[in-house]
Image (tube, helix red, strand yellow):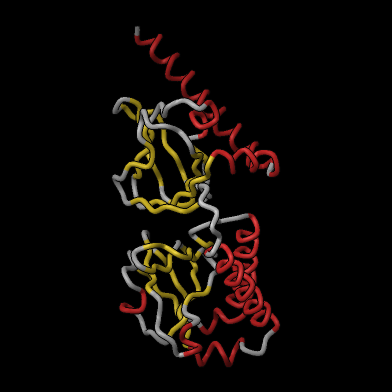
Amino acid sequence: MLYAESPSDELNQLGRTVTSHSRKVMEQIKDHCQSVDHELVRNLYQEEDRNALFFVEDGILYAESSDRAIFYFEPGDLIGMHALSESHPPVIRSMEPVRLLRIDAQTLRAKAGSSRDWQDYLAAQSAFYAECCCAGIDDDSSPKPGFRRYNAGEMIIQEGDAANEVYELMSGEATVTVQGEQVGRVNAGELFGAMAALTRTARTASVVADKPCMVMSIPMEHFNELLRTQPRTGLALMENMAQQILSLNRELVDMKKRQ
């Protein structure tokens, strides 16, 4: 589970904890759930029973408020806690096909309500929402990491623009072009946009979403700190840059052969 506005390390860890406990509950009661597939969710609780809850089995959904994504739900997350309190359902959408496990509130209470996994899930979720509230009233106006959504065909990075952020593609696929010519691709889980940001030069390529994408943007000041504190991120960046250099070398060799 991810908070869209400010994914700090603490919030990320709390979100992972929520998802971990939710997965344990899902495994405990999945035999009592019904699998449902959606090519695209425009508003989950207009398309499904508003008194049902859903575990995300595959894909990513998001809760929206005032046309802004607030929370992202990943595989293992539980959607629909309003059904347990009979409150108004949230607006839940997806940008891609999703597979959900549907369960009614009464069955969830009967099969998991007294379990330790369920109690741990509720405690983790409470801590997560409390930290989200604190992040929401932070008056620091400096740029922070955040999640952005792009539809197919939308520009994520524009060649020639100033480079102030590094990006990680959370879901979807994108094409890299230079002067309109395709030179590479970005797949889910990959970092991109780092070269220009690290060298403080203009963007040397454009990146366009091939399908609906969720992207985490990381301002340079945060990315520098991330490199110092998270060696795996630095390793992933070096691997990504090495692949780009290898790809360029192959293109140069092919060009010389054609000459």
Name the quadrant containing residue 24: bottom right
Residue at the location (31% across, 25% down)?
Answer: 179
Placement of 153 over or under 122, stated as above or below:
above
Q: Quadrant of the C terminus?
A: top left
Residue at the location (64% across, 55% down)?
Answer: 9
Placement of 99 over or under 259, stated as above or below:
below
Which residue is at the front of the view, 201 or 157? 201
Q: Residue 13 location in percent, x, y?
A: 65, 60
Q: Residue 53 location in percent, x, y?
A: 47, 81
Residue at the location (31% across, 79% down)?
Answer: 46
Say left or right for 42 vs 90: left
Which residue is at the front of the view, 133 or 101? 133
Residue situated furthest top in the rendering: 259
Placement of 146 over or under 231, stated as above or below:
below
Placement of 257 over or under 78, stated as above or below:
above
Q: Quadrant of the N terminus?
A: bottom right
Q: Residue 103 location in percent, x, y?
A: 48, 83
Residue at the location (59% across, 35% down)?
Answer: 237
Q: Residue 21 location in percent, x, y?
A: 64, 72
Say left or right for 208 vs 190: left
Say left or right for 209 vs 219: left
Disc tally is 0
Name the quadrant containing residue 159: top left
